[in-house]
Image (cartoon, coloured by chain):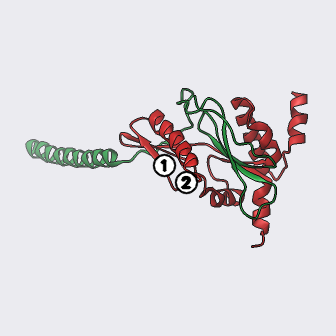
């Protein structure tokens, strides 16, 4: 099966997602943007905790908890989806073990620039850090 | 004549009160039927499911060399990226 331009575009980026919380009466539901699965609990903290546990459970069972996500990522590149950030892949690899605040600041900056049609690569990130 | 006028005002006032009461009841019902959808970012004191990022990588069929990695952070944010190495690893608390 040949790769399409769409696939090539998807592979330029890493994607970062924030959990979303929705309250309905006394029940909180946590999920990732566009996900086909979610978890619930009597508080936001419990719903989030279950989200993490379910993510780990699925991974360890050999299921991909983000199997649905490619469609969300593709959609995000056309029309921004709340809670989703597209980041240059090489830059993102640098951020995986970075302090959380640094990672969050950088993925937001990368997404902001992408929406302006500007690139934010690993070398640009490193240059910015030297200036800081 | 004055009494008639007063009576007429009273009747009118009564209908205004009745109408306001009905509107209030309808509004109260609508408010109690509302389903609140509140989108919030994860809290600062969120549960720590992991003590650091946990990474799972696999090499999809048809891709040469690159692994597709998923990462779960302690704050429950997640990411996916491509890596030339198998970065699988991480720890539970």
Query: Residue at coordinates 77% horizontally, 40% vertically from top-left?
Result: A109
Residue B40 image offset from top left, x and y in percent:
53, 39
Q: Residues within 10 Å of mark 1 (few under 14, many from 20)?
A: some
**Splitting the image into 4 quarters, where does residue A23 fall?**
top left
Please indicate whether residue B76 sits to the left or right of residue A118 in the image: left
Q: Residues within 10 Å of mark 2 (few under 14, many from 20)?
A: some
Residue A4 image offset from top left, x and y in percent:
77, 69
Query: Residue at coordinates 68% horizontally, 38% vertically from top-left?
Result: B89
A71 or A128, nearer to the observer: A71
Tell me the green chain.
B
Query: Helix, strand or loop at disc 1?
Result: loop
**Splitting the image into 4 quarters, where does residue A8 fall?**
bottom right
Q: Which residue is mark 1?
A: A38
Query: Residue at coordinates 79% horizontally, 67% vertically from top-left?
Result: A5
Query: Residue at coordinates 38% horizontally, 47% vertically from top-left?
Result: B35
A29 or A64, nearer to the observer: A64
User: Which residue reaches farthest bottom?
Assistant: A1
Residue B10 image offset from top left, x and y in percent:
14, 43
* Label annotation for residue A28: none
Q: Quadrant of the C terminus of chain B?
A: top right
Please indicate whether residue A125 sits to the left or right of residue A84 in the image: right
Residue B59 image offset from top left, x and y in percent:
73, 55
Q: Quadrant of the N terminus of chain B?
A: top left
Q: Which residue is mark 2?
A: A35
Query: Helix, strand or loop at disc 2?
Result: loop
Please indicate whether residue A72 sits to the left or right of residue A98 in the image: left
Q: Give the chain letter at badge 2.
A: A
Task: Tell me, yes or no, whether the two marked residues, 1 and 2, touch with CB atoms within 8 Å.
Answer: yes
Q: Give the chain letter at badge 1.
A: A
A103 or B86, nearer to the observer: B86
Chain A image colour = red
**Splitting the image into 4 quarters, where does residue A80 fall?**
bottom right
């Amino acid at each position: 099966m040949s790769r399409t331009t769409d696939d090539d575009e998807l592979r330029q980026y890493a994607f970062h997602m924030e959990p979303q919380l929705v309250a309905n009466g006394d029940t909180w539901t946590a999920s990732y943007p566009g996900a086909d699965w979610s978890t619930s609990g009597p508080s936001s903290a419990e719903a989030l905790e279950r989200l993490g546990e379910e993510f780990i459970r699925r991974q360890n069972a050999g299921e991909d908890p983000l199997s649905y996500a490619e469609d969300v990522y593709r959609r995000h590149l056309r029309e921004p989806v709340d809670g989703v950030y597209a980041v240059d892949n090489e830059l993102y690899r640098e951020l995986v073990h970075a302090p959380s605040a640094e990672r969050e600041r950088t993925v937001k900056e990368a997404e902001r620039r992408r929406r302006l049609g500007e690139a934010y690569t690993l070398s640009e990130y490193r240059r910015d850090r030297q200036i800081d | 004549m004055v009494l008639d006028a007063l009576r007429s005002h009273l009747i009118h006032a009564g209908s205004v009160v009745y109408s306001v009461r009905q509107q209030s009841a309808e509004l109260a019902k609508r408010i109690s039927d509302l389903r609140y959808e509140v989108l919030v970012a994860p809290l600062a004191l969120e549960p720590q499911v992991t003590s650091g990022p946990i990474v799972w990588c696999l090499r999809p069929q048809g891709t040469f060399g690159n692994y597709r990695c998923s990462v779960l952070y302690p704050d429950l944010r997640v990411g996916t990226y491509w890596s030339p190495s198998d970065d699988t690893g991480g720890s539970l608390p």
